[in-house]
Structure formats: structure tokens, C-alpha cells
Amino acid sequence: MELINRFKAYIAEEKLYHPGDKVLLAVSGGVDSVVMTHLYKQAGIDCGIAHCNFQLRGAESARDETFVTALANELGLPLYSIRFDTETYAGDKRISIQVAARELRYAWLEETRQKHGYTFLATAHHMQDNVETVLMNFAKGTGIAGLHGILPKQQHLIRPLLFAQKEDLLALAAANGWGYVEDSSNLTVKYTRNFFRHKVIPVIQETYPAAVPQMAASIDRFREAEQLYTEAVSRHKKRLLFKQGENFKVPVLKLQKAIPLHTLAWEIFKEFGCSPAQLPQVIDLLQSEPGKLVETPTHRIIRDRVWLLITPLEAPEAPLIVIEKETGVVSVKGGTLKLKIRTSEGAPIPASPLMACLDLDTLQFPLLMRRWKQGDYFYPLGMRKKKKLSRFFIDQKLSLIQKENIWVLESAKRVVWIIGMRIDDRCKITSNTRNMLVLEWHPI
Amino acid sequence: MELINRFKAYIAEEKLYHPGDKVLLAVSGGVDSVVMTHLYKQAGIDCGIAHCNFQLRGAESARDETFVTALANELGLPLYSIRFDTETYAGDKRISIQVAARELRYAWLEETRQKHGYTFLATAHHMQDNVETVLMNFAKGTGIAGLHGILPKQQHLIRPLLFAQKEDLLALAAANGWGYVEDSSNLTVKYTRNFFRHKVIPVIQETYPAAVPQMAASIDRFREAEQLYTEAVSRHKKRLLFKQGENFKVPVLKLQKAIPLHTLAWEIFKEFGCSPAQLPQVIDLLQSEPGKLVETPTHRIIRDRVWLLITPLEAPEAPLIVIEKETGVVSVKGGTLKLKIRTSEGAPIPASPLMACLDLDTLQFPLLMRRWKQGDYFYPLGMRKKKKLSRFFIDQKLSLIQKENIWVLESAKRVVWIIGMRIDDRCKITSNTRNMLVLEWHPI
């Protein structure tokens, strides 16, 4: 089958497109993302191009930006591009250049997707990328979750080229005379990945020439196996983990008999800060005397007579901070919030969900900063329907612990920002905005 | 921890020994099996040595046999050894030397284990062997079952060294001055395995020096994940597959909605001869009109209005063959049975479960050859208690199809041989046997 038809079939099978959808394409200018762009264009799907210039490779970075701009013009597609001061960002946050670039990239791409009303953000990961990921996970040590590789769809993020091999993409570009740029450093790819790409997989292919598609087929099966695994784990958790007010409890006798013990104990206790290294200690509690305990960074797991009791390490703190002024700094457990006022002139799109810009006229002071609670709802940016926070957190796949640590900002009894995650649509910047409240969340 | 203590801990954890057990050690004379022998001796476990001479490497084969004989003498352990004419066997059966050696080895080892009352047969597979197996499976394409690697225990077969790395075994042998032989050809190891051992894994270790133990830890987790997977699959099968006389049926609507569809369909239909290549056709039946069908080598899968009906390809044949004479040939569906009489003088132990030697005085002619049926029982060789065949087949992990194809030999209303699998203990050769009936089963 021709690649364009395999592309359409894959999109249909994995439900990566429905009539009316708009897709924002992350395009570096390399062969993968260029071929993806042409395929979307050929398939007649409404799409736009987003390009990040990390300004890390001097003239080569500028060349890539110019190339992608020309590609967008040639195909008549909307273009969104940004230049990041990646080195400063990495220095400020004391993270590696790779991690910085990745953070900046995904935060900006997601903001751009939301702001301009795109249904999906598409990246050009292909079959080799996927196989590399799984082999690396396996070599580093992983559970079954490390075997599903790169998923075709995670919420709004899609990977429509996972069905294709690198050679297919190169051949199609050559056959059509599609130009692309070569990234001499391959910045967002770590050394280890390049090593697996150029050293490990070719050696495996000497024995098994079809190793890449065979491993990709295996990964598809692992993905389905993981669904069944997750189903079984959920069923066990229902009979092994009970909520009681602020605390949780696990019946000792039932957990002792649970099969397979290690995996089920891990699935239960990882939510409460337990590390793989601590797991054997927690399992030892099953045989120990009442009163013994294991302390994780967030919880105490205590051996009671017939239960393991799980309690948060600290009592919940005073949950309400009143913010009277429009500028200043508020420090709470877990981080610091900075507030300032700006006019909306030339306002940049926040480059990270840690930052929010709200239309000042939609807000009413004092603001309240508090923990989220059951029953809270908001209008997620880009949506016209309200959504319960509890539902939103499920969609975002937050763990119990992550949920417990969420702060929200409230104005006139409305949640206006789930801090560090998503603003309310009714407070967003519009063409009518005069002044905006700029909020920065600095987690510890 | 010292290796001997890790060995004891591993044996305890995986339940590879209980007081009173006797363990038969498969010893080639290489470092792995020699270290295993010393560890068993040091642990004070009652054990014996079994050695196969495949007579494929001339003087080297003889040297190995001499070495193992000396080792058994030195440690005061019982020795069982055999010489195979591997090349003739491979030629007669038209199989590769590797496959022939493997078949001869496991059949003889298992017979020896049973005949001399050993609880377990132990082989010296270690951590590297395990990691190689899983990497090879992954590269060839596999489902989750290909990830559990070499299991520490499968019925009577145990692998007590899976916890250890090759380097550990070499170091211990060196530290204790334990001699061993080197196998220049490494016969039972295929070329592909050697390639993974010497070419693929060392390259991975350049990036991840601890790749082998990390992969081994992953494999342990996959093994537990597979248990949960299997649990979920069983639950789905209960609601998706129904037996109706000779036939089975699957509800179309329920299967259409089953998640994940491909994996669940595979787990259901593979039992009925469906190949991976045929699976998409079977899944297409869910959308097709009544009357369409897919034919596997053994079954017809027919789209009915609300069911997929599964029926065996052939009507069950006349199920009873009367064997009047003590010598001759009987041909049935699935294979040919040859009978002859021998005196028990210098009788060899059958080298394969495809061969059986029964004490002629315990038999009563005519014999009957028939399919097994529910309610059948026998006394499995080596056991003093009777066992239902249905139970025996579960222990042997036979699939539905394999069970359907089983023949048994009956004498005076007793099952005396499950053909190709196991004889009845009451008919075995003893020191009192005068003449024996030698049976050879040649499956098609």
C-alpha cells in the first residue's frame, strides 16, 4: 500500500482525526516532520505548522526557521513560530539543555494549540523512534508500562507516523523531491538514543533483518497486554485499598495472599510515595508486629493489627490564603506564586503552564488561594463547557498524591486557574483585554 | 551476599526445594553446570548427575564424559550418562542436529528423573541466558508470553541459577579452583544466541553497564505482569467463549465491544488453529453477513446471526482400534504406532516420550487404541496415586486442540499409555520383567 493510504488507514484505526478537527503540526524542518506535513496536506486535513527555534545552533537554527517558514508559505498553511532563550532558561532552572528545550517546546506547543483552536498537536515520531524507546527502557529496567513505547494518542497529543519506518519517509521525500534540513546536532535526541539508533539496532538487524517492524508489532501487542494488566490491577485495588477520611488502609491478610504480591503491592503503594527500593520494607510489614512503620517522602505506612494504615506525613495546613494586592509574592507549601500587572500590548503567550495571563477586568479582588475540593469546576481554556476538577484530573492522569498537592486560584467564587495546569476560559486574554494579571508559579 | 547464600535464598523464594526432595542435575561439564553441582553439594541437598554425550565432537565429547564421571566420583554423587547417535536420529526424523540433541536430551533426562525417583531436574541456565532469550524473542516479534524468559520452575524442571550472572559463576569457580571443560562448538546454543551473547548485549552494556541485571529485573516484573494479564484474559474468556457439545460459540456483540479486541480475539481463536495471519479475517467476520466463514487447519469459524460458531473440521472418526497382535503397525489419524517384543536384557531407557516400554506380563490382549475421554485415569509413571487424564493434561498445559488429538492405549480397561506422553506406573519395566512390549509412536 502507498504510504499516503497507510497514513490514512493508521489515522482512522487509532482515531487521530474526526471531521472538523484541526491539527497543529510540530515541524523542525527535518525529514520526518516535513513528510508528515506533506501527508496532512495531501490527505486534505485542516492543519497548521508550529516551529520552535531554540537558538542553540547559530546559523543552522536560523536556516531551519527560514526553511519551515518557506514550507508553510509554499503549502499555504498557517505558521506559528517562537524563539527561545533556551540556555538562559536552562541556567535559571538548573536543568540540562535537553530538558529545558523539551519543557519549553511542549509548553509552548500546547499553549499554541489551545489558543488557536487546534484539536490535536501532532509530532513526527516514527517506528524506529518507538523501538529505540522500548529497547532503552528495557535496558534501563522497566515494568510493563515501559513497553508500550510512544503512544499514538495521549489526550491532545498524537503521533500519526508511528506506523512508518524511517526508510519509508526518506524514500517518499526523495520520490517527490521534497526538501528538508538536516540537524547536525539532533538536539532533542539524547546521546543514548543516538547510540541505540546507530549502534544497537543495526547489530540486531544483522541477525533479524526485519527486527524493527517485528519489534514494533510486539510493542502493539504489549500495549494491548498492558490494558488487560491494568484492568486486573484495578480489580485487585478495589479489594485491597480502602479510603477512610484522610487516610487509606490495606487489609493485611488479603494482601499477604495477593498474587502476584510484589507487583500488586507496588501498584498500591507507589501512589503514596513508596520507591522501588522501599517496597521490600513495606512488604516486610506484612510479617511484622503492630506498631512498625515505613515512612515514604509523603506518607507513613503503619502496621496495625489487621490493617496497614496509610496516613499523610503532615496534617493538612490552613487551606486559605487571601490575596489582596495585584502584585506581590505568596509562599505556600509546595511553591511560590508571583503576581504582577502588565498591559496586553505585545503580550507573549506563556511559555509554560507554570505561567498564566488573565484578563484583569474579569477578576475580582481579593483572590483566594486554596486547595481544590470535590465539587469544584471550571471552564478549561479552549472549552465552552464547564468541567469538574475531579474529572479534569482523571483526564490528566494525576495520581492521588499529585491531586493532593494541587492549588487553585479563586475569584468571586470561580476557579480561575488550576495553578500550574490550566486557566479558566472566561478569564483568558482576548482582543478586548486592556490589562492582564501575570501569574508565575515556582514549585519547590 | 555470597553466591552460596544467594543460591539458597533463590531456591527458597522460588520454592525449588522442600525437605526430602532429590534433584537430578543436568551437567555438561561446562562452568555453569559444574558450579551448580558444587552449590548443590555445599547446600547439602540430595542430588545426582546426569550427562548426555551426543557424540558430535569426537575426542572433545569423550573428554567431557570423562570429566563429568570424575566429578561425580570426586563429589560422591550418583551418575547417569548416555551416548546418543544424534546424527542418525536427526537424519531419520529430518530435523536439525540442534533440535535432535534438544529432543533426545530432555526426553532422556525426564525419563531418568522419573525412573530414579528425583523430584526435580535442574539445568544451569543463568541470568545472561535469560536476558538473551527475551531480547531474541522481542527482536523476532512476540507477545507478553515471550517476555517472561526462562522460568525458574516448570513442573519438574527447575533453573536454580537464574539469579546469577555468568561472571559470578566464573569468579566462584576460579576462587575455589573448580575445574571445568570448555565446549568449543557450544552445540545446543544456536548461532543466533551466540550472536546476541557476543555482539548485541556487549554493545548495550557500553551505554548501560548494568543492562544485564536491569533487564533481568525487568523480566521478573514482566513475569508478574503476565500473571495479571492471564487473570484478565481468563475472565474475558468466560464471558466470550461457550462450549456446546462438540462445538464452541462466541457472542458477536460482546466480542465486538471487547477491549482490547485483537488480543482477546487472539487468545480465544488461537486454540482453534487460527494463525496470527488469519486473525484479521476472523475479526472481519464480526462485521460480515451470516454464512461467511474462515477455515483454520483444524476448525471452521462461521458467522451466524448473533454468534461465531466454531466447529471441528472433520467429524470424529471411528474411535476404537482393536490391536490383536503383539507386533505390527497401526495407522490412525495423526500418526502411526509400531509394536514389537523384546527381552528386557540390556534394555535401553526410551530416549523419548514417543517411545514406551511396557512389561508384557502386565498387559492383556487385545489392546484398544482410542481417544481419551472424560473420566479416564491412570497411574502416571513414578506416582503411586491415580490421576485423572483431564487433570494430567492441565498440568501438562495442553491446549484444547492438543487434548482433542490425544490417543490412549488400553489394556483390560486400564489406560496403560497416554500415547506420546506418559506410561502407567503399573506396567513399567522392573527387575522382574521378562519380556517387554516396545511401542513407537510416529506422529505425522
Image: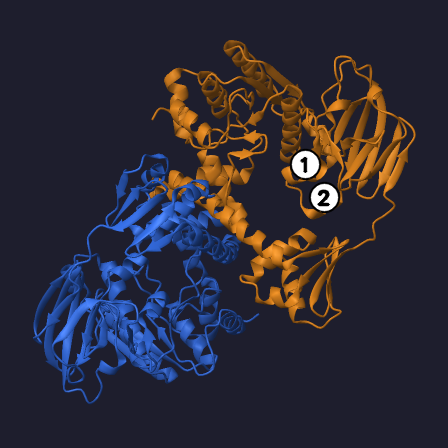
Chain colours: A orange, B blue
Q: Quadrant of residue B24?
A: bottom left
Q: Amino acid at mark 1?
A: Phe
Tags 1 and 2 touching, CB below 8 Å: no
Q: In the orientation shown, which residue stands out farthest toward the front?
A: B305
**Residue B181 visible here:** no
Q: Residue A392 has which mark?
A: 1
Quadrant holding the N terminus of chain A: top left
Q: Crowdedness of circle 2 by 10 Å Cα count: few (<14), some, many (20+)?
A: some
Q: Considering the numbered disc 2 on the image, is that residue within a helix, a strand or a loop?
A: helix
Q: Amino acid at mark 2?
A: Lys
Q: So how many labels did they put on this image?
A: 2
Q: Considering the numbered disc 1 on the image, is that residue within a helix, a strand or a loop?
A: helix
Residue A343 in the image: state x and y as whole percent: 82, 16
Q: Residue A403 has which mark?
A: 2
Quadrant holding the C terminus of chain A: top right
Closer to us: mark 1 or mark 2? 1
Q: Which one is in front, B267 or A82?
A: B267
**Residue A314 visible here:** yes
Mark 2 chain: A
Q: How far separated are the C-alphas under marks 1 and 2? A: 11 Å
**Which residue corresponds to the image point at 9% horizontal and 67% vertical from the top-left?**
B329
Q: In the orientation shown, which residue stands out farthest toward the bottom?
A: B432
Residue B15 in the image: state x and y as whole percent: 48, 72
Taking A106 as reference, is B175 left or right? Answer: left
Q: Is residue B425 above or below residue B247?
A: below
**Which residue corresponds to the image point at 39% horizontal and 55% vertical from the top-left?**
B133
Q: Quadrant of residue B441?
A: bottom left
Q: Earlier in the sequence, mark 1 or mark 2?
A: 1
Q: Crowdedness of circle 1 by 10 Å Cα count: few (<14), some, many (20+)?
A: some
Taking A428 as reference, is A2 left or right? Answer: left
Residue B33 in the image: state x and y as whole percent: 38, 70
